[in-house]
Amino acid sequence: MSLHLLQLRAESGDRRLAVAHDDGAARLIVGYATLYDLAQAALATNQPLAALAAGHANGAEIDLGRELTEGRILAPIDHPDPAHLVLSGTGLTHLGSAEGRDKMHKAAAGEQETDSMRMFRMGLEGGKPAAGEIGVQPEWFYKGDGSSIVAPEAPLRSPDFALDGSEEPEIAGIYLIDAAGKPVRLGYCLANEFSDHVTERGNYLWLAHSKLRPAALGPELLTGALPASVKGTSSIRRGGEVVWSRPFRSGEAHMSHSLANLERHHFKYAGFRRPGDVHVHFFGTATLSFADGVRTEHGDLFEIEAAPFRLPLRNALARADAVEVSVRAL
């Protein structure tokens, strides 16, 4: 059973949770205001998340298109304490994903074969292990906590010190750690992982710096299995005109790693299995405007859409205010 779950904020400010079906109809869920609460209830009652949601989807019918354009749809997941939500991801996981990275790092280091290409080849050879076997570990990075999540239609604010702010159209997995310390997958969402590729190009050891940025999550959480092939489009609009657009592909049919392998290598660390924590894990991409020579500008609108997700993810690029950082002795 597959459903689309959405978090909203009413005009009154109250939180709401909704279910959307493939036929386009959407109704409010009665009894639960957040996905976190619904997921905890599903664990407590040993029910599938989709079944519990469907059983309570007897509220008012709503117009999701209107809710989206009026800015009332929130990110599909959050945590009551943002410090207990981990944003992380893996790179070089998609077929073709090494090409742009290899160009950046080869230009910086002058190597015949870069570490990025070697990492990609390792994924091709061992990223989809047979059942019962352990595959090669992927590249991994940390992006932030729950305070770094940006909702659909909200601005993506690049730090004032950033050298670049560019989109990364991806699929993200959303997880909750149960009371026994076991990760439970709630579903998947569209995502704009958003990075500073100029900083990364300067030195591949600055990848960690380039990833410490906000990230936007698409309107819907898709329960159930992710299709083997997810096909969508990533675009940039400037002044209302499309200045760049390319199709992107995700899902295991287009990846060098299996989702199970990426999940295993993330959750093998005990610190990522703390009961009650939420994890949003980005699975990577092979499509970047930066690789095509595009330099983004403040005000550019990123737009990502892909079936089976019904609603697009749109965010405008903005610059965060400068912050003076200093350290004092106590």
Image (tube, rainbow, N blue to C red):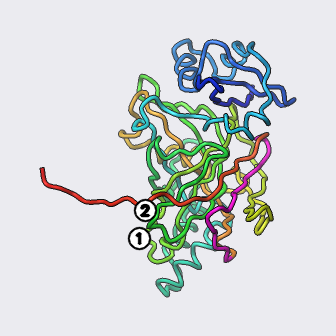
* Viewer can see residue 18: yes
Most foreground residue, 274 or 164? 164
Residue 303 in the magenta stretch? The answer is yes
- The spot of residue 217 in percent (x, y) is 62, 44
Secondary structure mostly seen in magenta is loop
Residue extending farthest to the left is 330
Q: Is residue 179 left or right of residue 214?
A: left
Q: Which mark is residue 205?
A: 1
Residue displayed at 72% across by 31% down = 4
Residues under numbered marks 1 and 2 in contact, where contact means CB atoms less than 8 Å apart: yes
Badge 1, how many Cα within 10 Å: few under 14, some, many 20+? few
Q: Is residue 299 above or below residue 214?
A: below
Q: Which quarter of the figure is the N terminus placed in?
A: top right
Picture quadrant where residue 71 is located: top right
* Viewer can see residue 128: no
Q: Which residue is mark 2?
A: 208
Q: Secondary structure at mark 1?
A: helix
Badge 2, how many Cα within 10 Å: few under 14, some, many 20+? some
- The spot of residue 77 in percent (x, y) is 57, 34
Q: Which residues are magenta?
A: 293-309
Residue displayed at 85% across by 30% down = 24
Q: Is residue 141 above or below residue 110?
A: above
